[in-house]
């Protein structure tokens, strides 16, 4: 009996170690592309094409980053991306919070049909409306303009959906009590609803930042002037124009990831919350 | 907790019997409140109308016309759709899209599920392992495409270098039609499995351990536990991932545009690539819009079908 238990415990241990080793090997494979980008960006340029380049660079040439920034207007792309992303985050988070709150906590005529319309926006592929969207933006005089990429994506169906799911659980009594006290609706929103919604606001800020920073198709058709290029458009340009200068391309690719890597490192749990909480409850 | 504290605070002054003046003020405000929700949703609805719903209707309108942007649109009825049905390139891009979806969606779900089950146990370094598998989700498609293009580079890519060291290859990863699609599929799996893993992990964690305790008492094997408890309870997650996966794979644009440009030839041209090309390279707005409408209807039909199947299974269960 005792021998049997310990036998089983032992085989469990063996199995666990086996799974662990597999997981570590898998993680190695998953991380390798990111590592290889780094290794290519920092190794001496002549090593890249030698064919016998080791897995670890023979030396670390940090100058490669400075060279890359000196040759292409990365800083201008980054500034454009940052402006677009920050403005978009502020607008999207504000209006999505208001909208999600209305859908969660008010009864009004047409509510369900309007919410369904919001959800259906989630299913319309961007490429289906890309032609008319381009025409609308052009008609508004916003081609090659920050607003031309900010406004079309400012209303975010997924964000409204997340906010609504979260705010449904705010107790009605809380809002009613404030109304009886004579608080205005905006005051209730800012003084009661917003402070209670900090977790979902964090999720929304981080997701919107990621969506806008990583956006490609919309800026591709809207930003026609190169001085308005975002980081993603710039990276695509490099891939076309300097397609053999892998040191520089990898250096710029790595720099383009820095904001996302920082956010990922510090706020990873919000990504997980946003993804896991969105459609499952 | 904080919520309760605020609730208590707010309730105190309102606890007394409201006076007639209070009641009147409250009534007036309730009247005003009827407008409030509309004002709160107005900014979003206005933006949706201008940048999503109107363009969708407009796309339908353009799809019935011949239009190169610089000339005036000319009504041609269903001609764009008829041309579509006879366009070999359209059928090829449709086939590529389907092959791509069938290759990436089930596989990313399966790997994501395996990872979630494995990483749901108590393991050394579990958090770090989860982070590494999840990392590609936050990396932009453009950066992913650029990195993948370098790894799969025919001449200097590390994959061919490693293959040659063990006496294989080199493989023309990006310059042969078959391998180019394969490289794209591998890259897409790299992007997608972390997402599937996170959704499955959340679903696994919401399963009450009492089910497993009961099953163990009845002597269920671990496979039986998985088959009869875990898998059925993961169905909503699987359903969600299936729909999101298909929508993603039908819309994948950035990755392909940057990594292969749809080539070599048209071997990796998906419908969305073809739409972009028709609109912004050959300036055939009507034709591009017609393709867009077909894609939209396909996604809509698939989602509705999935939804009905899901409902039926749920009714039976």
Image: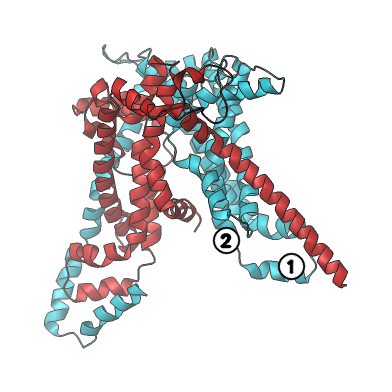
Q: Identify the residue position indicated by label 2 in the image.
A: B205
Q: SS for tag 1?
A: helix
- Residue furthest out toward the front: A59
Query: Disc 1 sits on a residue from what chain?
Result: B
Q: Which residue: 48% across, 27% down?
A: A40
Q: Where is residue B302 in the image (x, y as percent from the top left)?
A: 54, 38
Numbered badge on residue A106: none
Q: SS for tag 2?
A: helix
The N terminus of chain B: image quadrant:
bottom left
Depicted A246 relative to depicted A18: above or below: above
Q: How crowded is mark 1: few (under 14 residues within 10 Å), some or many (20 or more)?
A: some
Q: Is residue B29 left or right of A156 when viewed as pictured? A: left
Chain corresponding to red in the figure = A
Q: Is residue A128 visible?
A: no
Query: Disc 2 sits on a residue from what chain?
Result: B
- Residue furthest out toward the left: B21
Q: Residues within 10 Å of mark 2 (few under 14, many from 20)?
A: few
Of residues B165 and A214, which is closer to you in this image? B165
Q: Position of residue A79 (x, y in %)?
A: 25, 33
Q: Is residue A196 visible?
A: yes
Q: Identify the residue position indicated by label 1 in the image.
A: B215
Q: In which quarter of the image is residue A173?
A: bottom left
Mark earlier in primary sequence (1, 2): 2
The C terminus of chain B: image quadrant:
bottom right
Q: Which residue: 61% across, 67% down?
A: B208
């Amino acid at each position: 009996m005792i021998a049997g238990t310990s036998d089983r415990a032992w085989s469990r241990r063996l199995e666990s170690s086996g799974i662990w080793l597999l997981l570590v090997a898998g993680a190695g494979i998953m991380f390798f592309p990111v590592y290889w980008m780094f290794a290519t960006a920092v190794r001496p340029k002549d090593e890249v094409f030698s064919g016998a380049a080791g897995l670890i660079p023979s030396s670390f040439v940090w100058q490669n980053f400075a060279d890359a920034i000196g040759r292409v207007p990365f800083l201008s792309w980054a500034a454009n991306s940052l402006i677009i992303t920050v403005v978009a985050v502020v607008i999207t988070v504000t209006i999505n919070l208001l909208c999600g709150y209305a859908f969660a906590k008010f009864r009004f005529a047409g509510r369900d049909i309007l919410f369904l319309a919001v959800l259906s926006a989630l299913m319309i592929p961007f490429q289906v409306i890309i032609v008319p969207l381009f025409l609308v933006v052009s008609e508004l005089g916003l081609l090659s303009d920050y607003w031309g990429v900010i406004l079309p994506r400012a209303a975010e169906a997924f964000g409204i959906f997340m906010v609504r799911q979260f705010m449904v659980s705010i107790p009605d009594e809380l809002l009613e009590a404030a109304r009886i006290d004579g608080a205005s609706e905006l005051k209730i929103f800012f003084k009661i609803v917003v402070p209670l919604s900090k977790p979902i606001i964090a999720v929304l800020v981080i997701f919107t930042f990621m969506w806008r920073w990583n956006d490609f198709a919309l800026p591709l058709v809207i930003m026609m002037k190169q001085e308005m290029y975002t980081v993603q458009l710039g990276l695509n340009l490099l891939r076309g124009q300097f397609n053999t200068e892998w040191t520089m391309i990898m250096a710029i690719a790595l720099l383009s990831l820095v904001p996302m890597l920082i956010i990922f490192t510090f706020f990873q749990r919000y990504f997980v919350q946003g993804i896991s909480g969105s459609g499952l409850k | 907790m904080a919520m309760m504290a605020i609730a208590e605070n707010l309730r105190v002054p309102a606890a007394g019997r409201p006076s007639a003046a209070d009641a009147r003020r409250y009534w007036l405000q309730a009247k005003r409140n009827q407008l409030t929700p509309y004002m709160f949703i107005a900014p979003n609805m206005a933006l949706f109308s201008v940048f999503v719903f109107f363009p969708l209707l407009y796309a339908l309108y353009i799809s019935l016309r011949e239009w190169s942007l610089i000339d005036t649109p000319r009504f041609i009825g269903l001609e764009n759709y008829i041309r579509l049905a006879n366009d070999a390139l359209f059928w090829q891009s449709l086939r590529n899209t389907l092959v791509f979806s069938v290759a990436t969606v089930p596989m990313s779900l399966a790997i994501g599920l395996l990872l979630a089950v494995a990483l749901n146990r108590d393991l050394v370094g579990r958090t770090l392992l989860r982070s590494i598998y999840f990392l590609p989700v936050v990396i932009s498609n453009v950066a992913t495409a650029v990195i993948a293009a370098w790894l799969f580079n025919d001449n200097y890519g590390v994959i061919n270098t490693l293959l040659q060291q063990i006496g294989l290859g080199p493989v023309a990863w990006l310059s042969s039609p078959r391998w180019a699609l394969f490289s794209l599929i591998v890259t897409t799996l790299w992007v997608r499995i972390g997402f599937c893993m996170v959704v499955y992990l959340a679903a696994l964690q919401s399963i009450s351990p009492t089910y497993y305790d009961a099953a163990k008492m009845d002597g269920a094997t671990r496979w039986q536990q998985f088959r009869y408890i875990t898998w059925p309870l993961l169905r909503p997650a699987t359903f969600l991932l299936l729909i999101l996966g298909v929508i993603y794979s039908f819309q994948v644009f950035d990755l392909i545009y940057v990594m292969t440009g749809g080539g070599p030839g048209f071997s990796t041209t998906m419908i969305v690539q073809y739409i972009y090309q028709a609109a912004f390279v050959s300036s055939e707005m009507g034709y591009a819009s017609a393709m867009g409408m077909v894609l939209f209807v396909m996604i809509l039909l698939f989602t509705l079908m999935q939804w009905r199947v899901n409902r039926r299974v749920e009714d039976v269960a």
